[in-house]
Image (tube, helix red, strand yellow):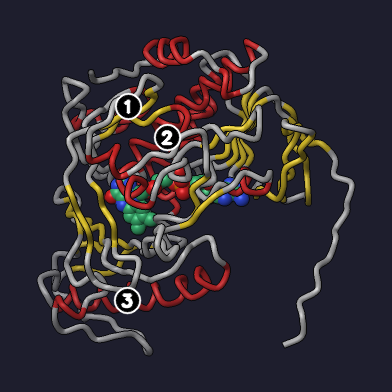
């Protein structure tokens, strides 16, 4: 094969909007970061590449919150406002409510309006404009072409650390020994029709006859009995969702598995159910982790480590879907630990934070901190930290931790001692 050419692409890009804080990616971390900054009195722009907020929860239909044992801050508020029946009295009682991805999508749209956050949908991050140790703007691909968005502080919530990596922040991917990441899963829903249905199996799909033949070697679903909805997490495709060839393969292979698993379920216990919804894109569990001032480790997670600069807390288990194509899942309970602010702070830049699943963490530690409630918590902390950095004219690494924690408490966060 001939050597691939490298092109230099130069273009003048007009500025479309400016704000104090620019958040890139509107998933759990990004929406909470935007709210955290807006409630600190800052003008906030939120850029989202798709047409909806909520990240994997809505786009990937991962519509169940995993239990974290600290139902707090903006996450608690979302539960109170959308799923009040599940709200625990205390902050340290775990809940795992299933929700409607359609309602959460609508709720987050309206929430951003109420908070005064300027959301740009279909704004796909392209590149950073870096001047010394600071970012001055980011460039996004919009419906009108490339546009710049200027800010004083930037928060990368893309899940893949796309902006941080573009700006030169070092990163790692997957297991320390071989770089393999957790596999991808295309989520789907089935609906009880109340009468027997004819199982469907399009050409080219698989016939599974036994649980051991299923992609995960197990049945994993949640039934919303009140409305007959079944949420199914049973497909599995090996690969790293931040790589072009891997995601290409995953999108087609996972859809074949959706039809095949649905067909299996229609023959094994769900004889009255039809396939009613397939997520618009395959769900990506793990891609890139930045290297920040501190890297959360398995030792910290297992040992229940506490940190002076704690900004989020969780006791979600270690939960590793086998990265190497096996049908196993490594699940280990943990008692509870802190996530320090430093995991979100790259060393080399003064005005960029990374929140959500791409924070600095080892493969094992990330498998526990990656769930939605924890990402909301990290985002909220990043939003407030960005605001404090602006107020104090400080680099992110110098944000006063005591004040950050006080502001988190003011915004409804409770830290478990
Ligand atoms: C199959 C699967 C099952 C899971 N099960 C559960 C579960 O049951 N419960 C649970 O709580 N968690 C679960 N998780 C984990 C959880 O959903 C994610 O880890 C969490 O959503 C990560 O939040 P985030 O904000 O960091 O990133 P994401 O949710 O990935 O959000 C990132 C956002 O950034 C946007 N974005 C990305 N790139 C760009 C760009 N270039 N420009 C602009 N925007 C961009 C994306 O469109 C997206 O909206 C699961 C994940 C998967 C994949």
Q: Residues within 10 Å of mark 3 (few under 14, many from 20)?
A: many
In front of the other: 336 or 235: 336
Left/right placement of residue 299 relative to residue 354 reads left
Q: Earlier in the sequence, mark 3 or mark 1?
A: 1
Question: Element at badge 2?
Answer: helix
Q: Residue 314's quadrant in the figure?
A: top left
- Residue at position x 78%, y 33% from top? 132
Confirm whether residue 166 shows in the render: yes
Question: Element at badge 3?
Answer: helix
Q: What is the CA distance from the residue labelled 2 to the residue labelled 3?
A: 30 Å
Q: Which of marks 2 and 3 is nearer the N terminus?
A: 2
In front of the other: 362 or 35: 362
Q: What is the CA distance from the residue labelled 3 to the residue labelled 1?
A: 35 Å
In the rendered image, which residue does mark 3 sit on?
A: 259
CB contact under 8 Å: marks 1 and 2 = yes
- Residue at position x 26%, y 52% from top? 319
Q: Earlier in the sequence, mark 1 or mark 2?
A: 1
Left/right placement of residue 44 relative to residue 307 reads right
Tell me the quarter of the image containing the C terminus.
top left
Q: Residue 254's quadrant in the figure?
A: bottom left
Q: Residues within 10 Å of mark 1 (few under 14, many from 20)?
A: few
In the rendered image, which residue does mark 1 sit on?
A: 81
Residue 163, label in figure = none
Residue 107, label in figure = 2
């Amino acid at each position: 094969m001939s050597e691939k050419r490298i092109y230099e692409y130069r273009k003048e890009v007009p500025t479309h909007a400016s704000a104090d804080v620019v958040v890139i990616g509107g998933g759990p971390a990004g929406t909470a970061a935007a709210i955290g900054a807006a409630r600190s009195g800052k003008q906030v722009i939120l850029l989202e590449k798709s047409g909806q907020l909520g990240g994997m929860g809505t786009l990937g239909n991962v519509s169940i919150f995993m239990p974290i044992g600290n139902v707090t801050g903006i996450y608690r508020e979302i539960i109170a406002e959308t799923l009040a029946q599940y709200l625990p009295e205390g902050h340290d009682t775990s809940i795992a409510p299933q929700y409607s991805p359609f309602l959460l999508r609508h709720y987050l749209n309206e929430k951003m309006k109420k908070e005064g956050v300027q959301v740009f949908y279909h704004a796909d991050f392209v590149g950073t404009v870096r001047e010394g140790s600071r970012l001055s703007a980011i460039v996004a691909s919009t419906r009108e072409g490339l546009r710049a968005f200027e800010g004083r502080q930037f928060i990368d919530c893309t899940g893949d650390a796309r902006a941080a990596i573009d700006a030169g922040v070092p990163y790692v991917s997957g297991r320390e020994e071989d770089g393999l990441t957790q596999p991808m899963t295309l989520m789907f829903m089935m609906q009880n029709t109340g009468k027997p249905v004819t199982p469907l199996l399009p050409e080219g799909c698989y016939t599974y006859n036994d649980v051991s033949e299923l992609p995960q070697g197990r049945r994993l679903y949640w039934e919303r009995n009140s409305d007959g909805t079944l949420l199914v997490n049973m497909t599995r495709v090996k690969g790293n969702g931040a790589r072009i060839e891997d995601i290409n393969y995953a999108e087609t292979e996972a859809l074949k598995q959706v039809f095949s698993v649905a067909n299996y379920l229609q023959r094994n216990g769900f004889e009255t159910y039809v396939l009613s919804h397939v997520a618009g894109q395959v769900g990506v569990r793990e891609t890139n982790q930045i290297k920040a001032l501190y890297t959360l480790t398995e030792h910290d997670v297992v040992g229940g480590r506490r940190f002076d600069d704690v900004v989020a807390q969780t006791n979600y288990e270690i939960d590793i879907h086998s990265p190497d194509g096996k049908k196993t899942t490594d699940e280990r309970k943990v008692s509870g630990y802190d996530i320090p602010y430093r995991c979100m702070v790259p060393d080399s830049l003064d005005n960029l934070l990374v929140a959500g699943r791409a924070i600095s963490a080892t493969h094992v530690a990330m498998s526990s901190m990656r769930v939605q409630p924890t990402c909301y918590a990290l985002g909220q902390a990043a939003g407030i930290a960005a605001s404090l950095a602006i107020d104090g004219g400080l680099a992110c690494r110098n944000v006063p931790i005591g004040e950050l924690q006080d502001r988190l408490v003011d915004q409804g966060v409770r830290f478990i001692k």
